[in-house]
Image (tube, grey):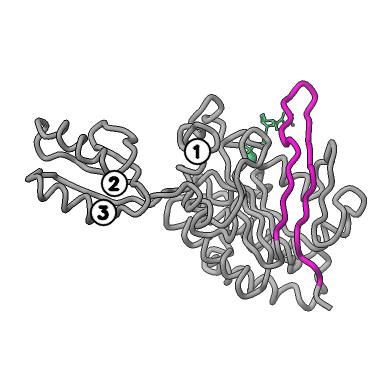
Amino acid sequence: MTRDNSIVVEKLVREFKKGPRAVDGIDLYVAPGEIYGFLGPNGAGKSTTVLMLTTLLPPTAGSARVGGYDVRTEGPKVRSVIGAALQEAALDPLLTGRDHLKLQTMLQAIPKAERKPRQEELLDRVGLTDAADRKVGGYSGGMKRRLDLALALVHRPTILFLDEPTTGLDPQSRTALWEEVARLAREDKVTVFLTTQYLEEADVLADRVGIIDNGKIVAEGTPTALKEEIGRPSIHVTPCREEDRQRIAELMKQYGEPLGSERELVVRLREGIGLVDVIRAMDADGVVVDDIELRAPTLDDVFLAKTGRTLEGAATGEDGASAR
Ligand SMILES: Nc1ncnc2c1ncn2[C@@H]1O[C@H](COP(=O)(O)OP(=O)(O)O)[C@@H](O)[C@H]1O
Ligand SMILES: [Mg+2]
């Protein structure tokens, strides 16, 4: 019998004394083997949710079952099936990567004969074999995150929680981590619950995305479905000559709803209108443009539609400086 490595959350609430309702009645379901991206700006309630699902913080109300076990009443069982790489990574700068894995295999009571092979396998898996005997204090941000991930995998969890695993990483380290997470889900059928502030991360990596803002889930679905819900792509035109701007704007208005006009003129295309239609019309009108581009809606358009703010804007808001 295969274990049910799903996550089922109903009306989950967490209040802090004098604080806000950090998590304000969320419902969600993560299917076995699925990568679920929990996307939201700083302070949205992502970490608080993860802390409850990993049994580190008791819910104020509501329920959550992780791997079939109740986070309130079956903490040890939940902890036996999950792995977690949280934002406050507890790495010791004076120990090496291998030391950390050695300790973790002991803490997780991996049988003695299996410890060494398990360490080597995990070091290899996250690409730290060559750096295994260096002190963690000298590791880059990306290497620390990869070590975190290896530590979370020591006891072969079937459900993995990653809280902003790539925040602050350079694009290359980010891609490497995405590949590893994707492989865990595809090959090892691990269920992954991952929080992020990055649209692209949710878009590229997640099978389904939940967008959280002020403790509430404001949208949920596959990235494709969420973007389709927003609808039509937009056309962005940079006029060649400033004196043509007005004329181009008038022309574009016939094909969709104007969205803005700073340097670029932008319209959200009406149903049934394509880029060619606009280009033909401009051609017929003898209009010259520097650049014309069709852009599909992004998850930021989804966030904007649901909250009235852009995620990038929200992320650099009041508490933007304290990334954790
Ligand atoms: N221990 C705490 N005590 C009081 N308020 C808290 C505590 N932890 C988080 N909060 C508040 O709860 C809200 C959600 O925080 P958090 O879950 O950390 O958001 P995120 O991980 O999405 O950035 C924020 O307003 C934050 O200030
Ligand atoms: Mg957080």
Residue that badge 3 annotates: 275
Q: Position of residue 223 (x, y in %)?
A: 52, 55
Looking at the image, is mark 2 or mark 3 earlier in the sequence? 2
Real-space CA distance between mark 1 and mark 3, rounded to the nearest whole angstrom: 23 Å
- The quarter holding residue 5 reads bottom right
- Residue 305's disc is 1
Asked whether the beta carbons under mark 2 and mark 3 sit within 8 Å of each other, the answer is yes
Q: Nearer the viewer, mark 1 or mark 3?
A: 3
User: Which residue is drawn at the image coordinates 48% and 51% (left, top)?
Assistant: 227
- Image position of 184 with respect to 234: above or below: below
Most prominent secondary structure in the magenta stretch? strand
- Residue 235's disc is 2
Q: Which residues are magenta?
A: 3-30
Helix, strand or loop at label 3? It is: helix
- Residue 170's disc is none
Is residue 143 found left or right of 108 in the rendered image?
Answer: left
Is residue 8 found left or right of 135 in the rendered image?
Answer: right
- The quarter holding residue 1 reads bottom right
Helix, strand or loop at label 1? It is: helix
